[in-house]
Amino acid sequence: MSSNYRNFRNSVSWLILFLEAVFIVLYFFLFSDDGASRSSISYPAFQDVNHMVIFGFGFFLTFLKRYGFSSTGFNLLIVVLGVQCSMVIEGLLAFLLQRENEDSLKRITKATVSTTAVVISTGVVHGKTNPLQLIVMTVVEIIVFRMSRWINNTFLQIPDNISMMHVHLFGAYFGLAVSSCFSEPSPRSEKNASTVKSELFSMLGTLFLWVFWPSFNSVLAVDKRKAIYNTYFALAVSAVTAFMLSVLTSKDGKFRMTHIHSAVLAGGVAVGYAAHSVEYPWIAMILGLLASLTTVLGSCCLERCLNPALKIHDTSGVHFTFGFPGVLGALSQVILLVIKNWTNLPRVGYLVLFQVGAFCLTVSVALLTGFITGLILNLKLFKTIPVSKYFEDQFYWEFPHLAVGF
Amino acid sequence: MSSNYRNFRNSVSWLILFLEAVFIVLYFFLFSDDGASRSSISYPAFQDVNHMVIFGFGFFLTFLKRYGFSSTGFNLLIVVLGVQCSMVIEGLLAFLLQRENEDSLKRITKATVSTTAVVISTGVVHGKTNPLQLIVMTVVEIIVFRMSRWINNTFLQIPDNISMMHVHLFGAYFGLAVSSCFSEPSPRSEKNASTVKSELFSMLGTLFLWVFWPSFNSVLAVDKRKAIYNTYFALAVSAVTAFMLSVLTSKDGKFRMTHIHSAVLAGGVAVGYAAHSVEYPWIAMILGLLASLTTVLGSCCLERCLNPALKIHDTSGVHFTFGFPGVLGALSQVILLVIKNWTNLPRVGYLVLFQVGAFCLTVSVALLTGFITGLILNLKLFKTIPVSKYFEDQFYWEFPHLAVGF
Amino acid sequence: MSSNYRNFRNSVSWLILFLEAVFIVLYFFLFSDDGASRSSISYPAFQDVNHMVIFGFGFFLTFLKRYGFSSTGFNLLIVVLGVQCSMVIEGLLAFLLQRENEDSLKRITKATVSTTAVVISTGVVHGKTNPLQLIVMTVVEIIVFRMSRWINNTFLQIPDNISMMHVHLFGAYFGLAVSSCFSEPSPRSEKNASTVKSELFSMLGTLFLWVFWPSFNSVLAVDKRKAIYNTYFALAVSAVTAFMLSVLTSKDGKFRMTHIHSAVLAGGVAVGYAAHSVEYPWIAMILGLLASLTTVLGSCCLERCLNPALKIHDTSGVHFTFGFPGVLGALSQVILLVIKNWTNLPRVGYLVLFQVGAFCLTVSVALLTGFITGLILNLKLFKTIPVSKYFEDQFYWEFPHLAVGF
């Protein structure tokens, strides 16, 4: 085991070093000029998204009682690697297609939004993957997601800011497909549980995500004001609905923290596609209500029927937090399009076809490449961790304070 | 008990569902157009206030050792309900009085600031009310506060941004009046206490409130720059003074965390009324010093004499954190008005009369309606929780991690 | 002991009161007009720096298991005192030199950036100084740092925004010199250790610092966009490198939290000097990589050789977190200057001389005055705390919750 572990340690270091070297060399060739001088994105808007991804998601995942270091630490590692990787790919594409480079702040912002897909995927395999696997997964997923977006933009004429909103769907289904290749943890695993304090840290992350979600949905939108307004209302209603449904569905009529964590965010995910185009707040509110409903019912349903049947273990409930509301959002966008353009039937058919096509393509690409990635990550090369070491910080981190207690 | 609880569970769900349905229907009728297209409020300014109310107050209240989930969770629930409720009432008023709607961002911001009153009130009854009571209290308080502001604006010609600053006073005295109708917890209650970690979470919330207070005081002000500047200095001096006074008043010359939590914010509360009009920073500084003094001395005095006499239990020390500095702020504003206009005595008399009138009106309305609300909340209908279940997360939340320890 | 302590308690109160009185009086005379009406600094930019210093540094230092209250509390106290003190000195200088006052927001921002020096210094003596000593140190350091900057500006023609970036270097070496005068804690001290939860709180602070560092480096820069961009990339690469090096240098190939805390920030410190002038992101990235390398290797090297030899105890690893990357940054700025101007050799010589002069001057002033301050702080007057009471919240704070456990 010891020599085996040494091996792993070396591989993770050299892989990171190799990636960084490649990034720096490619930055040298690709980003020699700074693109446009005026950015369409303000620094506070970027900062909100950055804060949300680094801090919000980092703490959102700290609910496991012995996995706090890895949750916040590996999240930082993945985000910074993902952002660099995403920018390099964008630069390569711009170079190959002879397109003009965007300004620097917009580049970083788009890269950060793309990286959210990876962060969501890691939620599914949270605690079951070692850093080596996470890094490989990050690079692969960033490439595949860019490819999927490129197909959407080029062949299906989906504008960039809409195809970017597939990020939740892509992240969720890619992660689920990866997870299907991993062994399931023992259901009686004492470590796959939370404590009151770890849930409170997770609540901290959730509230950050909640507060910054309007920034996330509006940062790339054309009509930023409308996007902010609609996202806020969708989030507000889904937060309220979350409390209502949690009481109704749980066994003895108590609130369940998992429901709150997931469902308060569902509205933001669902309204992502249509945030910039919804005309009236009540539509966003109904969407928020439906999203929260989907999430809580989905969570109950998955727990009892689907997950045991499909044998997919989903540590952070990504499927119902991001997957279902994402599907609902894509669907609602199509319905809104139909309502808006119903006087012009041929155009409606055309639009619906392309939107549904983009949705199906994104999910299929995510599932397919996710499954392949999962198979690759289970190669002996990547030293899959044994099930007994799942959800365990001590496997990766030095604990000089072992005796002190948690 | 069990069937009784099931009843409660159903009532809370249906009440939330009913409210949400009403809100969505009213939004449908009231907010069909988007008002003005340019907002006088920037998105980052709104975001600061939003962040402060959701995150700052949520964690500010986590000091009780077994009430962390409820503190952060119920705070989110109350804020989102309160904001929606406040916007609906504003919309109804605009419709009834045939006034023009404000732009969307300003509407949400004003609603968020109004909701602070509710958040402050819940601090007094923190741990003693069930969610059903909290929701009813939220709706009632939002309506009454709007009514009180409307009287202030219409009959006493108090401008909107000043009457909005009564939010601390109103919240504090409404809460205290509500609390007077609830049974007191046993003074030896082991649960009405904090741990080191829960105090640290509370410090996290306090620092958030401290950092964002200048945003709160300036968001609706006319001269935003001056409001920011003055609030910062008042806060800085009150933070310094808090440490000084805490050492002087505590038994063996140590700092007391409760003093720090309350007194560092006192300056921000007290300067709220005058922040946009104070000419020189030293005035704001003196105000901050006095506010901190009022808070710490008030806390000692209340603890020893007033509270046992009045039999009002105040879980989070709202009386001395928001009540006393609010009174001081209102007073100081009058004094500053007198000094500014002393050459024009008739005008001074007129102004002072109206300001004092507004202050008295706000406090009386708060006390009266608060007391009535308290009586209503103690009806059997609302299933008041027994004193033995005060300050107990487990009464409302599922705890799958019971055995794990805190 | 008791009467001794009472003495201490009185001195800390009266010292604070005296300082506040002096500040208010000087504010009265110095800041009667508000300077320019348009600020070159936006409120969100100031807010980021304020947030970072109050919240980020406050929680960055909470890693000690029994020193959480003091970490966050004393940090707040020091920052607010430091900002007021720094503004007063700036005002006095402007008055003495008959210079025009800057606008209020710029004044507060510059004061907050200056105060970072004090916050960094307190990191070295964290847990070993009482509040009395901290307050004296704050006032002395703020004065000396302003003096050192004044010499840099006047005699070495270093622009203000560059001399301000010496803040990390100055803070680190001042703190180390102060620390050299204090007794070392026992190496087996059980209290000089962290728990998992305290490290998680510290991670919270670190992530805040990480996210807001681009704001810190850009707030006073001329080319803000470039400063943001370069700082982000330096931080990203140093975060990635931190993980790589931590695995390579630790005993059994695990990540060490201390490395992550320090090294993820190293890039931001190192790029501080050159952030506004680096042309291409790959240069910032290489700088970030080198900074992280310096930090992690420095940490290993110091721990094994230098610190035991020099007998300097450095609680928070300030030497390798801020000292080494600061030196690297100053060096890299000189190299970049040489490369940029190599066609004009006389000018290069001139520039290099002045930059190196400024660096040497800053470090020598910091070491010298720090040592003197350390000697003064160890006078009997300041009631140095005994080594057995190091790192102990209970020495300063009331603990009504003692029995409850941590």
Image: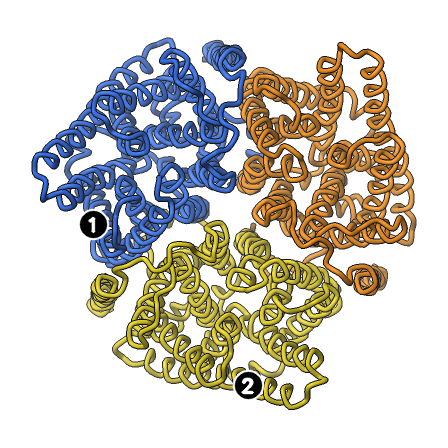
Chain colours: A yellow, B orange, C blue
Quarter containing the N terminus of chain A: bottom left
Answer yes or no: is residue B338 visible: yes
**Residue in the image at 70% along x and 47% along y:** B112
- Residue C343, how many percent across, how many down? 9, 44
Find the distance from the CA under tag 1 to the CA under tag 2.
48 Å
Q: Which mark is residue C290?
A: 1
Label 2 SS: helix
Which residue is drawn at the image coordinates 53% and 39% (left, top)? B200
Residue at left 40%, top 83%? A369
User: Which chain does the residue under circle 2 lie in?
Assistant: A
Q: Is residue C32 above or below residue C117?
A: above
The type of residue carrying mark 1 is Leu
Residue A199 seen in this snapshot: no
- Amino acid type of the residue tagged 2 in the rendering: Phe
Q: Is label 1 or label 2 in front?
A: 2
Name the residue tied to disc 2. A354
Does residue C75 appear left or right of residue C269 in this picture? Answer: right
